[in-house]
Amino acid sequence: MNDQVARLIELRKLEERTRLHPLSKIISVASGKGGTGKSFFALNLTYQLSRLGKNVLLVDLDCNFPNIHLFLNHATENTIADFFTQRKVLREIIYRYSENMSIIFGDSGSTDYPKLTRDSIDYFFIQLNKIAPQYDYIILDSSAGADEFTIRQLSKSDYNIVIATPEPTSVMDAYVLLKFIFENTEVTKNYVVFNKSESKDDSDSAFQNLSTALRHFLKSEVSLLGVIGYDRIVYKSIMEQVILMKSYPNSKSALEINELAIRLLKITQVANNNQSLRLTRF
Ligand SMILES: Nc1ncnc2c1ncn2[C@@H]1O[C@H](COP(=O)(O)OP(=O)(O)O)[C@@H](O)[C@H]1O
Ligand SMILES: [Mg+2]
């Protein structure tokens, strides 16, 4: 057998293994309570990853208070409710925002919204995994809290990013959510982002307190993905219904989100390279 044929067979095997063990790309953005900046962060992270050349799908899975369409002043035609009521498949409800960025919007105010259960999210993930190969990353904006649907969602994600503010109440909420995650899921790649931080001291001591509590009570660790400072320009971008990273790319918070996006790229690439290496060694 010549080298080229051998190489082709090797490649085929690798493709098959990758199909059976897909790369880690599903990232949930979660928080203990609402208002910490999940939707703002999920949208801006998605946009920035797409600017960095990745093909990204954002899904508004906050079925109680979906917001992504409002952030963009977008009149939704198809929403995730069409999927959960089995009127449409995922492919039909994807909105192409730009070449590298797609969005599945949420639905608010719908009267026939079904009660979402563990089974609903399992069904969602089965369908999501079918379209996943088209994307480099899939970002899931979540409901606040730890209801059955959300915990199941977090357990099925490859990465969870918990967003908190440095206030003690929010740190406590993040701790409780992480406790739920550790106790109910096998996801090991959990990160924290402190948002609306007024100073480096605030976010440093918030992370220190969270880490100490996790270590002491749960014998667990969490990594800090990064910090986004409190910035009035965020409020302005939301009032104007524009994407901060797009309209104010040089603002302090935009630069911080860019750093976060790059860090996340590195983390996921290292994880996926290690996975590919493990697979090729077989
Ligand atoms: N870094 C920030 N600086 C200032 N205000 C922020 C920042 N991040 C978020 N906000 C404010 O917090 C509000 C809630 O954000 P949102 O993303 O809707 O939270 P969640 O999705 O967690 O409920 C936004 O309307 C915005 O005004
Ligand atoms: Mg939200």
Image: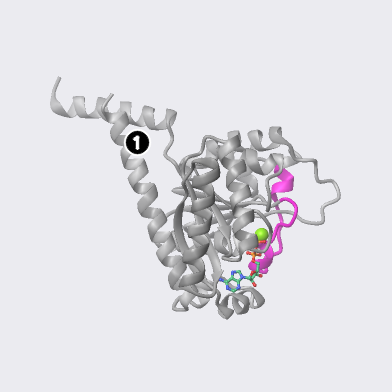
- Regarding residue 7, the answer to whether it shows in the image is yes
Label 1 CB-ligand 1 distance < 8 A: no
Please determine whether, in this image, residue 31 is positioned above or below residue 153: below
In this picture, residue 112 sits left or right of residue 76: right
Determine if residue 27 is in view.
Answer: no
For the stretch drawn in magenta, the main secondary structure is: loop
- Residue at 47% across, 49% down: 222
In this view, the residue in front, 83 or 148, is 148
The foreground one among 48 and 258 is 258
Q: Residue at x 71, y 64 (%)?
A: 75
Vertical placement of residue 41 versus 211, above or below: below
Amino acid type at image mark 1: Gln
**Residue 148 highlighted magenta (yes or no):** no
Side of 9 where 126 appears, left or right: right
Q: Magenta part of the protein: which range? A: 63-83
Q: Quadrant of the N terminus?
A: top left
